Each structure stands twice: as structure tokens, then as C-alpha cells.
């Protein structure tokens, strides 16, 4: 019964998921190519744009939510995050040709007794709907994997919701589902070898 509910909600959440062909046609009309996007590390001056992007992408993903977090809430959260300067986290953003932020991914160190074998966490990864399914998500994941590897971290976890249609992306990126003791799936994934992930996620 629970699996049927998850499948139903994933179907509902995925109704607005864009098609690859539609997004490619739209970007071509705008004169945007995959090579025109820039990936870079986020900086404090990105906070206003990053907060707006975070609020918008969350709303697009969880569009059935009645009270989504506002841009003001996200700005406060990012302001607090950038105060942490101990190297325990990082964030990569994607810029389009107009220098507008269209996606981001945040990684952080991970230390939890329930999963002691893992030391990295993909804390967030979002793209605006119209920029999905064209290869940007794969590149973002590649940047995260390489950054962790540079830090000596060779594996990572991700915690989400099982209803999230982006689970299909995690599956395609060879993510391994994290199952509870009763074998139920609650939305978590892991990558036990980040070098293998980096190999299938080129950044150039």
C-alpha cells in the first residue's frame, strides 16, 4: 500500500516535469547552448540571487505544497550558511549566458552514527524546470563529486523524499537507494565510490 501511495504522489509531482525535447527547443530559440553555461563556486554576493533561485526551484519541485518557503526565508538561511567558514560545506551555481543563476548544488561533510561509513552529503541540488534534462544536473553532480574527492571524501549520501520525481535522476546517476531496516525506501540515496560517479559525470 505504501509503495502505491509513493508511486501515486511521484506521478502527481511529476506531472509538470519538462520533456528533454521541449527544453532543448526552448533553449535553442534563446540562443543558449550547453557550452554557454558557467559553473562556479557560490560567493556571499550571490546570496540574494541564490535565495530567489532556491525558493523558486523548491516551489517548482514541490508545487503541491501549500506554504512553500519564501525568498526571505531562504535569504536568511543562506546568510547563516555563509557565516560558516570552516570548510565543512561548499556550493556550486550554474549561470546562463545572461549571468543569471539557474541551478545550484550544495555539499557538506557528513558524520552520523546511523551511517558511519559515509563522510559526504549532497545536501541540495536544484535546477529551474526549463533547464532540466539537458545535462546540467549531471555536470553539477560531477563538480560535487570532484570537490569531495579533492577533500579526501570518497562517498556521499543524499536525503530526499520518495515522492520527488527527481529520484529518477538519482537512479540514472547510479545512486543506490538507502533502505530502512524494514526495507522501506524513504528517499535517501548513496554513492559509495565518487570516482565512479565523477567518471560518468564529465564537467567539460
Image: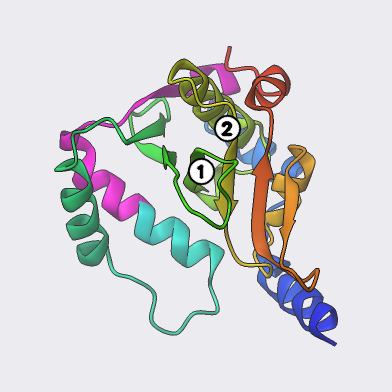
**Placement of 109 over or under 36, stated as above or below:** below
Crowding at label 2, few (<14), some or many (≥20) Cα neighbours within 10 Å?
many
Q: Find out whether residue 101 is within the magenta segment.
A: no
- The residue lying at 71 percent from left, 78 percent from top is 9
Q: What stretch is highlighted in magenta?
A: 32-53
Is 18 in front, or is 27? 18
Side of 120 where 162 appears, left or right: right
Instruction: Name the secondary structure under disc 2.
Output: helix
| Tags 1 and 2 touching, CB below 8 Å | yes
Q: Residue 200 carries which label?
A: none
In the rendered image, which residue does mark 1 sit on?
A: 122
Is 170 in front, or is 121? 121
Q: Quadrant of the N terminus?
A: bottom right
Side of 173 where 56 appears, left or right: left
Is 3 in front, or is 7? 3
**How far is mark 1 from mark 2, CA to CA?**
9 Å
Is 138 in front, or is 21? 138
- The residue lying at 17 percent from left, 59 percent from top is 76
**Placement of 13 over or under 48, stated as above or below:** below
Residue 147 placed where, x, y %? 46, 22
Q: Which of marks 1 and 2 is nearer the N terminus?
A: 1
- Residue 42 falls in which quadrant of the image? top left
In the rendered image, which residue does mark 2 sit on?
A: 141
Residue 128 placed where, x, y %? 50, 49
Residue 157 placed where, x, y %? 58, 46
Amino acid at each position: 500500500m505504501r509503495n502505491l501511495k509513493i508511486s501515486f504522489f511521484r506521478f502527481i509531482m511529476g506531472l509538470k516535469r519538462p520533456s528533454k525535447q521541449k527544453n532543448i527547443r526552448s533553449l535553442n530559440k534563446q540562443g543558449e547552448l550547453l557550452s554557454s553555461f558557467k559553473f562556479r563556486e557560490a560567493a556571499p554576493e550571490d546570496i540574494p540571487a541564490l535565495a530567489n533561485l532556491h525558493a523558486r526551484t523548491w516551489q517548482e519541485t514541490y508545487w503541491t505544497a501549500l506554504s512553500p518557503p519564501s525568498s526571505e526565508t531562504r535569504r536568511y538561511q543562506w546568510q547563516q550558511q555563509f557565516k560558516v567558514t570552516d570548510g565543512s560545506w561548499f556550493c556550486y551555481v550554474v549561470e546562463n549566458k545572461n549571468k543569471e543563476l539557474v541551478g545550484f548544488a550544495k555539499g557538506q561533510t557528513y558524520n552520523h552514527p546511523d551511517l558511519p561509513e559515509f563522510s559526504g552529503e549532497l545536501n541540495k541540488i536544484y535546477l529551474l524546470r526549463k533547464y532540466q534534462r539537458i545535462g546540467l544536473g549531471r555536470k553539477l553532480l560531477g563538480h560535487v563529486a570532484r570537490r569531495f574527492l579533492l577533500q579526501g571524501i570518497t562517498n556521499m549520501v543524499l536525503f530526499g523524499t520518495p515522492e520527488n520525481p527527481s529520484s529518477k535522476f538519482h537512479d540514472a546517476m547510479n545512486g543506490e537507494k538507502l533502505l530502512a531496516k524494514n526495507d522501506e525506501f524513504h528517499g535517501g540515496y548513496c554513492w559509495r565510490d565518487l570516482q565512479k560517479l565523477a567518471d560518468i559525470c564529465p564537467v567539460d
